[in-house]
Image: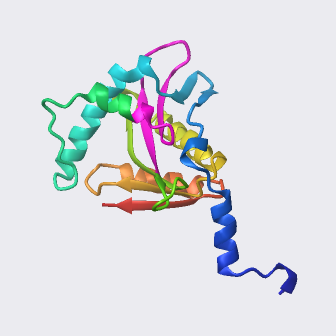
Amino acid sequence: MDLNKTTTNNEVQSDSLANLKKVNEINNQLYVESGDLVVCSANESHVSEVAELWANHASIQQLNAPGRYAFKAEGKDWQAFVRRKIDKKNNLLLVAHKKGEKEVMGFLYLQTITLPASELVLKGVIEDIYTKPQYRKQGIATKLLNVALEWAYDEHIKQVDFVSLPNIKGLSEFYFRFLKQFKLDLNLTLLTV
């Protein structure tokens, strides 16, 4: 063991904390092209369609975990909900669409968690990822995840939790396959709730 390179847990934690960004330092504006697919940060032009997709996604979540998700579909203003997500500058709402087209094929929402009583971003949580049924098994969700995790890495977010419901067909398996092939130095955890 090289004694000159020995560090204590406190020094490692201190180094890790020193690299954390404050909420106001996070840049959540992305635009990534991959072939004919574009993954970008959602904006006002996406609100209506993402609101409809998120309402569908929420219905599936509620059916599979009524104790965890208690959305009232009637009366919920999903467009206002999506706008609030877009306005949270330390979180990431991504959409995928074909280059030159406006139709949203899928979306992903990564919420950041801060250290208690601070503005330092500690980790991210992905609980909302949805691809329209007609676009599934085309690599869209994988591309959304890759872009989100590369963003997290660039923003010094070193821990990302994936939340999956046990009754959602194929989601845990998809996450598990994804986690096995992902290469960046991030601590990724699959949580089944």
Q: Which residues are magenta?
A: 85-112
Q: Residue at x 54, y 12 (%)?
A: 100
Q: Is residue 105 above or below residue 89?
A: above
Residue 153 in the figure: left or right of residue 122: right
52 and 7: which is toward the camera: 7
Q: Residue at x 49, y 60 (%)?
A: 115
How many numbered callouts?
0
What colour scheme has been applied to the protein in the rendered image? rainbow
Whether residue 103 appears in this view of the structure is: no
3 and 175: which is toward the camera: 3
Q: Quadrant of residue 6?
A: bottom right
Q: Where, quadrant-wise, is the C terminus in this rendering?
A: bottom left
Point out residue 106 in the picture as x, y percentages from the top left corner. Answer: 41, 31
Q: Where, quadrant-wise, is the N terminus in this rendering?
A: bottom right
Point out residue 61 in the picture as x, y percentages from the top left corner. Answer: 25, 45
Residue 140 in the figure: left or right of residue 79: right
87 and 43: which is toward the camera: 87
Residue 156 in the figure: left or right of residue 132: right
Farthest residue in the top direction?
100
Question: Does the magenta run of residues contain 93?
Answer: yes
Whether residue 64 appears in this view of the structure is: yes
Point out residue 36 in the picture as x, y percentages from the top left corner. Answer: 58, 21
